[in-house]
Amino acid sequence: MAWTTVGLALLVVLFGALQYGLIVYALRDLMRRPSVRGDNKPLWALVILILPVAGAVIYATIGPTSFIPRSERPSQPQAPPPMP
């Protein structure tokens, strides 16, 4: 196999991984948000799935209407309660 063929194959695999990652991230974000622009989550999911890269980018730029609060994590690990 020529190096150009290997390089093109690697490029296709990397693009596919990027596309899959964007779709998963956008769908996960969509399901976690309480509301999105237009209040139509199924329609946004279809846009993300039908237009793989463009749909995820469109959703990221105009879809979300609110921020998701991060869960509060304790700064120090909690010790388990003592055994009796």
Image (cartoon, grey):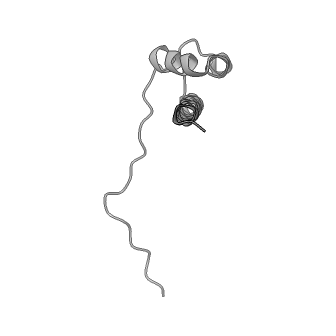
Occupied quadrant, residue 81: bottom left
Q: Nearer the viewer, residue 65 or 49?
A: 49
The residue sitting at the top extreme is: 38
Q: How many discs mark residues in the rendered view?
A: 0
Q: Nearer the viewer, residue 4 or 29?
A: 4
Residue occupying the point 43% across, 82% down: 82
**47 to 26, vertically: above or below:** above
Residue occupying the point 48% across, 21% down: 60
Q: x and y percent of residue 41 in the render? A: 63, 21
Occupied quadrant, residue 8: top right
Q: x and y percent of residue 5 in the render? A: 57, 32
> Is residue 43 shown left or right of residue 58?
right
Quarter holding the N terminus is top right
**80 to 3, vertically: above or below:** below
Occupied quadrant, residue 15: top right
Q: x and y percent of residue 44 in the render? A: 62, 18
The residue sitting at the left extreme is: 75
